[in-house]
Amino acid sequence: MGDDLTAAADAILRRAVAGPAGLAGVVAMATDRERVLYAGAAGLRAPDAPMTRDTVMAIFSTTKAVTATAVLQLAEEGRLDLDAPAATYVPALAEIQVLEGLSDDDTPRLRPPARPVTTRMLLLHTAGFGYDIFNERYARLLRARKQATVTSGTRAALMTPLLFDPGESWEYGSSIDWAGQVVEAVAGERLGAVMRERIFAPLGMDSTGFVLTQEMRSRLARMHQRGADGTPTEIAGFELPQAPEVEMGGHGLYSTAEDYLRFVRMWLNDGAGPHGPVLRPETVAMAATNGLGPDLKIRALPGVKSHLSHDAEFFPGMPKSWGLSFMINDEEAPTGRSAGSLAWAGLANLYFWIDRARGVGGFWGTQLFPFADPASVENFLEFETAVYRSLS
């Protein structure tokens, strides 16, 4: 199995970086419950340095599952009620209102919500928050300078209106940034400190954090933007805020494929880590279950800002739900991914999946805008398919 998978995956990574329209660099890894099945990289992380399995990347929304894990830990301990108003812990949430519309000058028309936002809603993305990358009304507010962009790392960026009454729909957005604020309020520490103590140390994730250490920076991959001709060009000086007012639980972490695979393996092992339990098995089982109910499904993400994202949907036409906090494919995927598996992605074309039924998961990391880059997605899915073929 190992030789076959290595040959197939190495070939996929070589194709992914081939030619002027190829990825600048990519790292891919797969694991079962006990060990790494594959680790490979191709291309460059910087003009003078190859991409490697320990290359540090801005992992964007793959941060969300880590923040959700911290939330679930506090809920296990009885310190956080997922179904209580989240404003119990973060009073600023009580100030948020529902956006009913925009005037001609893009002034928002607001009203009080029909019910309070709960932490469970934040994890499920049913609270009502969106992203200006994927929602035109948010994008209008940003253009009119009536809203701050979420990547600014500011409290002002959190104070965005709800797009609907809490609990009534699904919209992908900044909910997990608020969930991170709930963690801070309950734990009495900054989110990064909570993660280091409760998640990174037990899992041996020593190259993950909101702030780049000097050693991490020495392995940092450069960010790229795909141009009109398809060629990736380096974005000089790109970096997420390194002294943010808010450590954004929805997108702010830097990490490596090696570290993230340790996180994936913990979920495969019912919450167990190499240096102690991170979550209880019953918590993992609950979080890995559809939390939207039988009728509500997640939707495709429209690429409102084309330089940051294409229109994006995983496995188009297949019903998909949401857990705490992952996408769940309700049917077996064409790659071989089991129904009920967990997955999500990061804006710079990072992708992961966790198949608890078959005991396998993987991670694909690049640093490229816009999101849902066809070459990135196609090669990631080929990599995932190669992993499942090796299992059989």
Image (cartoon, rainbow, N blue to C red):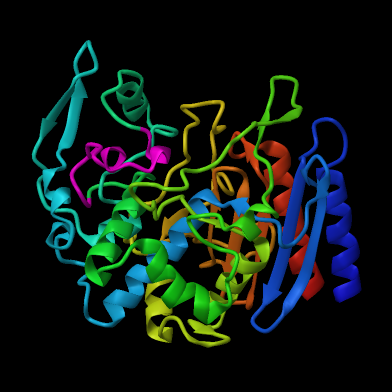
Magenta stretch: give its range: 149-167
Pick the front one: 100 or 155: 155
Picture coordinates of residue 358 (x, y %)? 63, 77
Residue found farthest to the front: 214
Image quarter of residue 192? bottom left
Image quarter of residue 24? top right
Q: Would you say 23 lies left or right of 106 here? A: right
Task: Identify the residue shown where x is 87% and y is 40%.
Answer: 18
Picture coordinates of residue 159 (x, y %)? 23, 40
Task: Identify the residue shown where x is 75% and y is 20%.
Answer: 229
Q: Quadrant of the C terminus?
A: bottom right
Task: Identify the residue shown where x is 48% and y is 81%.
Answer: 271
Note whether residue 324 is visible. no
Q: How many marks?
A: 0
* In the image, residue 359 above or below residue 343: below
Q: Would you say 245 lies left or right of 220 here? A: left
Note whether residue 300 is visible. yes
Picture coordinates of residue 3 (x, y %)? 91, 72
The answer to if 166 sits in the magenta stretch is: yes
Picture coordinates of residue 98 (x, y %)? 17, 37
Residue found farthest to the bottom: 276
Pick the front one: 327 or 212: 212
Q: Quadrant of the N terminus?
A: bottom right
**Mainly helix, strand or loop, the magenta region?**
loop
Task: Identify the residue shown where x is 39% and y is 55%.
Answer: 249
* In the image, residue 69 above or below residue 142: below
Q: Would you say 4 lies left or right of 354 here? A: right
Pick the front one: 75 or 296: 75
Q: Would you say 199 lies left or right of 255 here? A: left
The answer to if 38 sits in the magenta stretch is: no
* In the image, residue 117 above or below residue 230: below
